[in-house]
Image: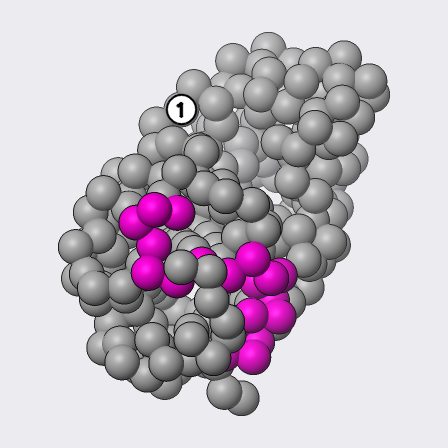
Amino acid sequence: MVGSVEDLKKLLQQSRVVTFLGGAGVSTESGIPDFRSKGSAEAAQKRFGYPPEVLLSHDFFLAHPDIFYDYYKSVLLVPASPNPAHYALARLEAAGKLNAVITQNIDNLHQQAGSKRVYPVHGNVEWNRCMECNRFFNGDYIRNSQGVPHCDQCGGLIKPEVVLYGEPLDQQVWRGAMAAVSSADTMIVGGTSLSVYPAASLLEFFMGKHLILINKTETPYDRRADLILRQPIGQVLGEAVPQ
């Protein structure tokens, strides 16, 4: 049913273990554009000559690292700060209610807000490695680099540890996410249309009592939900989780 923040508060009070699964809508409220949106895709095609699905593919990265990094730095490494949704989830974890944040986003904002157990199923912009010597580099190294970033030790090409099209998910992260979902009695899904797989398939592992969807548009799982909220996720969670 479509309900209110008060309904959400009541369900959270009844819940013992909550898991959160979030998508691009959580980050757009921090000013990070959804690269899959029609406007972003058209802008990428016009400026770079390719759609995002090509620009962010493994093969394209290897063949055209210069174009890849031009797009990556300008679209995915934009400055941003956590919004009320990120902070509310961190508070829910600190209160002992939330067992994990599972995010399809790569922006590291949940960690910045204070969440400790985060499963970034598509990777994280703060994790980068040299493809030759495996040396680790943080996000600032990439942001401050000129052109294509290379290792300051061996000169090898640095690759972000984000899941590009054509690459498998990190199985350790995926198993952790599945375990979190399986052990929850309440699952909150926010800021996602649940159309991106395999992340959306995580709902198949949820056997708990309450499924809560916070999204501005309909999803394929609306019929299964106990509670649906159509308001902005930052507003909803910010009001539902006490300071």
Mark 1 packing: few (<14 Cα in 10 Å), some, or many (20+)?
few
- Residue found 26% across the figure and 76% down from its top: 15
Q: Nearer the viewer, residue 212 or 116?
A: 212
- Residue found 37% across the figure and 81% down from its top: 10
Q: Is residue 97 left or right of residue 234?
A: left
Q: Nearer the viewer, residue 39 or 138?
A: 39
Instruction: Read off the residue under disc 1.
Output: 167
Q: Nearer the viewer, residue 49 or 202?
A: 202
* Vertical side of 109 occupied by 43: above or below: above
Instruction: Say which quarter of the image contains residue 83.
Output: bottom right
Residue at the limit of the structure toward the right, as seen here: 47
Instruction: Say which quarter of the image contains residue 46.
Output: top right
- Which amino acid is tagged 1? Glu
Q: Which residues are magenta?
A: 222-240
* Vertical side of 33 occupied by 197: above or below: above
Res. 123 visible in picture: no
- Residue found 50% across the figure and 61% down from its top: 229
Give percent across and percent down for residue 119.
37, 53
Asked whether residue 10 is drawn in magenta, I would say: no
Q: Secondary structure at mark 1?
A: loop
Asked whether residue 238 is drawn in magenta, I would say: yes
Residue at the limit of the structure toward the front, as seen here: 1
- Residue found 70% across the figure and 43% down from its top: 33
Q: Is residue 116 left or right of residue 172?
A: right
Q: Is residue 124 left or right of residue 10?
A: right
* Vertical side of 163 occupied by 187: above or below: below
